[in-house]
Image (cartoon, rainbow, N blue to C red):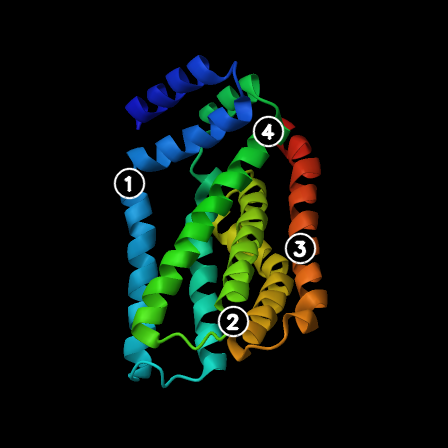
Amino acid sequence: MVSRLVANIIYLHRHMKNSSLITLIKKEFLSEWRQRYALNGIILYLASTIFVCYMSFNLKVGIIKPITWNALYWIIILFTATNAVAKSFIQESQGRLLYYYSLVKPEVFIISKTIYYGLLMIVMALIGLIFYSFVMGNPVQDLPFFLVVVAFGSLGLSSALTMVSAIASKAPNSHTLVAILSFPTLIPLLLIVIKLSKSALDGLDRSGSIDEFVTLLAINVITFTLSYLLFPYLWRS
């Protein structure tokens, strides 16, 4: 732990003068790579959850109803996002956050966290989709549109959970607080995402989903904007 912190400090000192945002994103990747057990744990959790769902239904590939297939997939992605993103601020020590406070602006810091965990969740969602399709079949008729929904849904989940993690890190019992705060935040997003992905499963005309897709984009923009505007006040505390 100490050696990883020292390596992060040296890296930040060397590269912060060029571009603080890019440097912080690279730092997140390097930190995740150095503790690969955490990343491997997320992938193992994702794979084992999918396999448990398959064994629970005890069905052959392609027999499960599309509406059930869709609901199970997003439940899996939701819990994977909670495990992967909720620790974004909770795992940071107070001393390390104080060090970051002296180096970068809070807006840059929250943007770097959001971008990194957004990319991470997109990758995890795609890996989950591949394995999920392998064991449970793939009834999606409009795959390109479904992938777009998965990408924006993953970004929305990561953005909301990153801000919730930042708030929860300032209070005791952080993990419990994350679960409580994230529930009302994620429900509207999940309702829109499930409806859009259901349209992709049924192969419906995309023009009929424009309103829902615009709503999804609006939720993402609002969540990101609130994080950008409110995080500086949380950062100072």
The amino acid sitting under disc 3 is Leu
The amino acid sitting under disc 2 is Asp
Q: Nearer the viewer, residue 231 or 212?
A: 212
Earlier in the chain: of badge 2 and badge 4, it is 4
Secondary structure under badge 3?
A: helix
Earlier in the chain: of badge 1 and badge 2, it is 1
Secondary structure under badge 4?
A: helix
Q: Nearer the viewer, residue 137 or 195?
A: 137
Q: Nearer the viewer, residue 134 or 183?
A: 134
Q: Which mark is residue 214?
A: none
The amino acid sitting under disc 4 is Val
Earlier in the chain: of badge 4 and badge 3, it is 4
Question: Residue at the spot x=70%, y=60% of the render?
Answer: 214
Q: Residue at label 3?
A: 217
Please name which of the two marks, 3 or 2, marks the residue nearer to the observer. 2
Q: Quadrant of residue 20?
A: top right
x then y, percent, for residue 97: 50, 27
Q: Residue at label 4?
A: 108
Graded by Cα atoms within 10 Å as few (under 14), some (14 to 19) or many (20 or more), the crowding at tag 3 reads some
x then y, percent, for residue 200: 55, 72
Earlier in the chain: of badge 1 and badge 3, it is 1
Graded by Cα atoms within 10 Å as few (under 14), some (14 to 19) or many (20 or more), the crowding at tag 4 reads some
- 9 versus 31 height, above or below: above
Q: Residue at label 2?
A: 142
Q: Residue at label 1?
A: 36
Spatial CA distance of label 4 from label 1 is 25 Å
Question: Residue at the spot x=41%, y=57% of the render?
Answer: 126
Secondary structure under badge 2?
A: loop
Spatial CA distance of label 1 from label 3 is 32 Å
The amino acid sitting under disc 1 is Arg
Q: Quadrant of the N terminus?
A: top left
